[in-house]
Image (tube, rainbow, N blue to C red):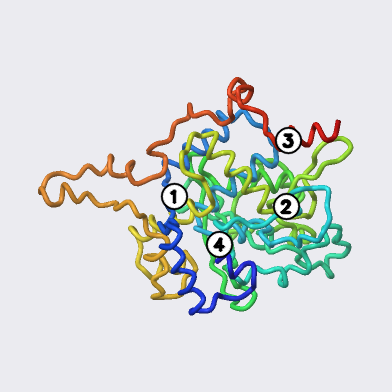
Amino acid sequence: MLFNRENGRHMDTNIGKEALKYIDTFGLDNTIKSKPVLGVDDLLLLLNHHWARDTSTFPTERHRVQFALILLLLFGTGCRPAELVDAKRKRREATSSDDDDDFEVDDNADLGPEDSDDSCNNNDNHNDTFEDVDTMIRHFDALCYEDVRLLLVRSPDSGERDVLAMEVVMAHKGHNRRPKPTIFFFTEVDDPIFCAITHLVTLALADDAFEAPSLTTPERIFEHKVWGPVLCTPLHWKQAKLKTPIFRRDEPTADGCITSPEVALPYSQFHHCLNRLGRAAGFQEKLTSYCFRRGTANVVNRTATDAVRDQVMRHNPNSAVYNGSYINERVRFDMQSAVLECPSADGVLRMLTHMSLIRDPRAPIHVPDDILAALPPDPDITALEQERE
């Protein structure tokens, strides 16, 4: 993967065989790194810490809401981060005062060769403005309002209020060459912390994205009714908002930070927040977006057919990618109970197979000041300081 990313092509087979010889020669570690799997209990711990226990701050409060929605969509769809945020690699020669503009995508992003710099020509200029609805173009491959449809569906129970549903169109990796999107549906969840629709409505109201002028408060949206002989009523977005990314970056101004009106959230900002949340919540293993994707894959594999699993994960049919890269290395089957023919301990086994098993919220996040003060000065820095003086 590293050779492909740096050279734009795969390594020759013979060269690869020669490189493998050096593993034994130099005693290199060829152990496959751990691939932790996230479960719904882990997600609840993360969201609870995010909303109730996290003492860190976000540049804007909108960022706090959109970050939680990204986590829900990652787990609810099994999507890659490049399907939600702007994960294109920015050119190193581009100068910017913001460090987030000059980053390399993490290995765990798994964006593939399709997401190379040559497919990102329109994303370098963040100063493009949307002047006319008829001439608007999509500047980012991130999730935009046109990819999400909010529906008011007639309640199947007579006398109950009509409910909201959400349709999300995901463009898979390599969609520019193979346009075959996958559509996911979300419904209202009784627990607000898990309700993706509530989060989306919050962001849409903040963006003034609803076309109907009466939809200005949560009460008006959730109490809306389906009229006439139809099963659902779409809640349309404003035409000027269709190409706007839902998840957008924060930009500094003279009066403080604001949410950019049109620039998508870069992967670097999301990746930083995700890593920080994992450390703050006490997870020992590094929290990445692929922990969510692997968790979704394992849940679907247990409850659906292989065809549905491959559709959800956007894998080619019968490709065996799941078994090679996504299956939980911790076997979720009580072998001991099976061979001893005794009742299975499913509850304990469920905890043992997820990454929050050894989580400790008391784990320190920063190095204590007394330990830092006890460290000897760096000789290189000391020499430079003396040279400067």
| Labels 1 & 3 near each other (Cβ < 8 A) | no
The residue type indicated by label 1 comes to: Asp
Residue at x 45% of width, y 74% of height? 17
> Gap between marks 2 and 3, in whole Å?
56 Å
- Tell me if 213 is positioned left or right of 268 in this view: right
The residue type indicated by label 3 comes to: Ile
Q: Mark 4 against mark 1, which lies toward the viewer?
A: 4
Residue count near mark 4 (Cα–Cα under 10 Å), binned few <14, some 14–19, many ≥20: some
Q: Is residue 342 visible?
A: yes
Residue 276, given in percent of the width and then of the height, sits at: 59, 39
Mark number, residue 210: 2
* Residue under pointer 4: 110
* Residue under pointer 1: 157
> Gap between marks 1 and 3, in whole Å?
71 Å
> Gap between marks 2 and 1, in whole Å?
27 Å
* Residue under pointer 3: 381
